Amino acid sequence: MENIFRLVRNVIPPLTAKKHKGQDGRIGVIGGCQEYTGAPYFAAISALKVGADLSHVFCTKDAAAAIKSYSPELIVHPVLDIPNAVNEVEKWLPRLHTVVLGPGLGRDEVILEHAKGIIERTRAKGIPIVIDADGLWLIAQHPSIIQGYQGAILTPNLMEFSRLYEAVLRDPMDSNDHHGCVLRLSQALGNLTIVQKGERDLISDGQKVLVCSHEGSNRRCGGQGDLLSGSLGVLAHWAFLAGSEKTNGLNPFLVAAFGACSLTRQCNSQAFQKYGRSMTTKDMITEIGTAFNKLFET
Ligand SMILES: NC(=O)C1=CN([C@@H]2O[C@H](COP(=O)(O)OP(=O)(O)OC[C@H]3O[C@@H](n4cnc5c(N)ncnc54)[C@H](O)[C@@H]3O)[C@@H](O)[C@H]2O)[C@@H](O)CC1
Ligand SMILES: Nc1ncnc2c1ncn2[C@@H]1O[C@H](COP(=O)(O)OP(=O)(O)OP(=O)(O)O)[C@@H](O)[C@H]1O
Ligand SMILES: [Mg+2]
């Protein structure tokens, strides 16, 4: 694992006086509906805390006020449930480096149809897209939206992975062979990057499988996956920009995903040491700065 940590460090842009706001990352999170306002907040604030300069949330109208009130740092667009949603988001795409689609998106048919359009437009512009949570629900219904797009990174938990696997390979996953299943799913989707989260995170582009077993804790409060997808939004941009010269020929998205997984687990470990069973995702977010320094800036 130590070698891969070195590659993650290689893609992290230095902080210099020569940069203007926006250069280190403008991330757009697509998600947030009446039921779920925490998930897009966790993803978007994590992107900022990891080092993005600007973090946008595109959510439904009734989620926007709540998300804004959690944080003045986020830019919130209440557009996901208007008829013109896809065009409204598309206007912003040229200003975004990465899209993170799914945290708190919900499963309303109309919103999912809009999400489908947003994926298509993001893909057409070649912008990296992290797909998580209800975004993966959508992909399981329509795998062709993402099939063959190597700018996509999917971050399923075990339940989401088995749903996707069955939808794409038309076979139940073999729970004795996670390694083979991740490899096969990535290959079947055209070698896009898959992060199967779990006791060990398995990360594959259909050619290689990286394993992240960095120490976390046994506490599994909701929202940890949102911290991961938001962090990955930034790291994917940095790795994409750095290119494979900086990653020793390894797919930059594998390196970015390894970075986001180890960071999430490090935050989990640090917060658990302080709060034990009462630890929640907010406590993990507070640890992002020190966890990042410990892993990547020593
Ligand atoms: N504070 C928030 O707003 C949060 C919102 N979240 C959002 O919640 C939405 C749903 O995501 P979830 O990951 O909770 O997905 P689900 O609502 O599908 O699953 C929640 C949990 O229920 C259990 N479960 C699900 N299906 C089951 C089945 N068939 N049999 C037995 N147990 C089953 C599993 O333990 C699973 O982890 C997403 O939009 C997600 O982003 C989560 O990210 C957590 C935090
Ligand atoms: N058994 C485990 N042991 C250690 N770490 C784990 C374990 N399961 C998951 N994790 C870590 O927790 C993080 C989130 O994974 P998890 O499976 O909880 O996502 P999720 O279900 O999508 O979360 P969310 O509640 O945000 O939707 C990942 O970084 C993963 O490495
Ligand atoms: Mg999740």
Image (cartoon, rainbow, N blue to C red):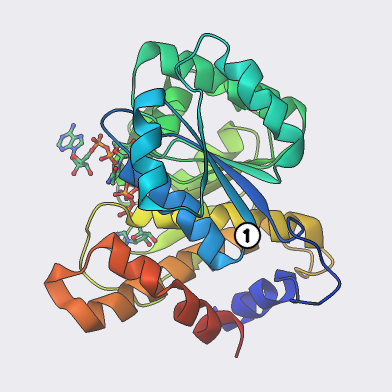
Which residue does the image show at 70% across and 33% down from the upper left?
Answer: 93
In the rendered view, does 80 fall on the left or right side of 237? left
The amino acid beneath tag 1 is Ala
Which residue does the image show at 32% across and 46% down from the upper left?
Answer: 38
Q: Taking 155 as reference, is 61 above or below it?
A: above
Between 2 and 297, the one lying in front of the other is 297
Picture coordinates of residue 241, whole percent (x, y):
79, 57
Q: Residues within 10 Å of mark 1 (few under 14, many from 20)?
A: many
Between 41 and 140, the one lying in front of the other is 41
Instruction: Look at mark 1 in the image and give the residue it sits on.
Output: 52
Q: Regarding ligand 1, which quadrant of the image does it lie in?
A: top left
* Quarter of the rendering containing residue 283: bottom left
Q: Taking 89 as reference, is 194 above or below it?
A: below
Q: Taking 204 as reference, is 169 above or below it?
A: above
In the rendered view, does 90 fall on the left or right side of 62? right
Q: From where the camera sits, is residue 292 visible?
A: yes
Picture coordinates of residue 260, whole percent (x, y):
52, 63
Picture coordinates of residue 137, whole percent (x, y):
39, 27
